[in-house]
Image (cartoon, helix red, strand yellow):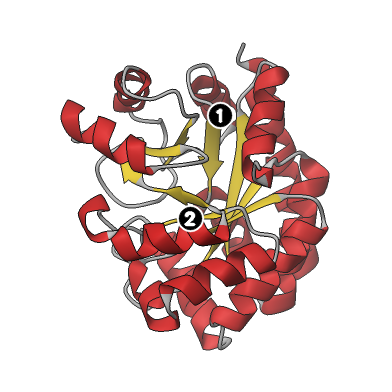
Amino acid sequence: MTTQLEDALKRAKSENRAALIAYIPAGFPSYEGCKKVITVFQEAGVDVVEIGFPYSDPVMDGPTIQEAATISLRGRTGAPQVFSTVKHAHSVGLATLVMTYWNPIEKYGADAFAQEIASNGGSGVITPDLTIEESAKWESAVLSSQINSIYVVAPSTTKDRLARVASHCSGFVYAASLMGVTGTRTSVSSGAEDLVSRLREETTLPICVGLGVSTREQAKSVASYADGVIVGSAFIKILLEAKSEAQGLESVRALAKELALGVREAR
């Protein structure tokens, strides 16, 4: 049995393009506002949505996502809101992932957390701070709930470790394009293409690149060598700067359409 994520990546490949993956924290810009953003993503050509589990100490995230997480936590977003947001994303037809640090999973219970993802139509979970050496409990939970487990590799990851981490992934391997935190960049690191090339020697899984993509041209560039292009901070920045919810949604729609064109122009 394949997940909706695996189907979405296969569909993009059959169309000779990379998938567009958009990130939004649950509860941002508000609980209902987040659901509206996800609906706009689907209408504008996004293939997969990553729903962030807001966390008080997001070590991998830059100031933009940290600010969004703070707003979300202020609105009392917790596990029930994250799971219901997953359910909404699934209901509008998007393959859905949750990105979360390990602490909320451990607090909730690994088996229960994985089962909630599956029960609400989610395809899997990205765990940026969980190492494969410490993931036995999580991998057992993922296996029994039949969801994808996605780990992150970086340009500094050694050849041997790339192979080991990739062997623990399902769905795709998350390639962080640079050393550092999330955030938009004027250009995507040249290390990203090299990292994808190195990963291709170790795995047949799809490889999706995140950290720094914010424009159609950048999406086009990354889509020329990756199987998926992940965009987060660019959408959040738009929503933080918007004068109103309606303006924010229209700006998100415009950017998502541009990025969707970018991933389709690459090959």
Task: Give above or below for 24 relative to 163.
Answer: below
Q: Secondary structure at mark 1?
A: helix
Q: Secondary structure at mark 2?
A: helix
Nearer to us in this view, 67 or 14: 14
Task: Give above or below for 45 relative to 124.
Answer: above
Q: Amino acid at mark 2?
A: Leu
Task: Give above or below for 100 relative to 170.
Answer: below
Q: Amino acid at mark 1?
A: Ala
Kindly identify the residue that appears in the image at 17 percent across and 29 percent down. 160
- Sequence-first tag of 2 and 1: 2
- Observer-side mark, 2 or 1, equals 2
Kindly identify the residue that appears in the image at 73 percent across and 60 percent down. 89
Tell me where residue 86 appears, x and y as whole percent.
Answer: 67, 65
Question: Mark 2–mark 1 contact, CB under 8 Å?
Answer: no
Kindly identify the residue that appears in the image at 65 percent across and 41 percent down. 2
Q: Does residue 243 appear to the left or right of 103 in the view shown?
A: right
| Figure quadrant of the C terminus | top right
Can residue 223 be seen? yes
Tell me where residue 223 appears, x and y as whole percent.
Answer: 55, 23
Q: Residue furthest top?
A: 267
| Figure quadrant of the N terminus | top right
Q: Which mark is residue 219?
A: 1
Nearer to us in this view, 129 or 114: 114
Residue that carries the numbered disc 2 in the rendered image: 143
10 Å crowding of disc 1: few (<14), some (14-19), many (20+): many
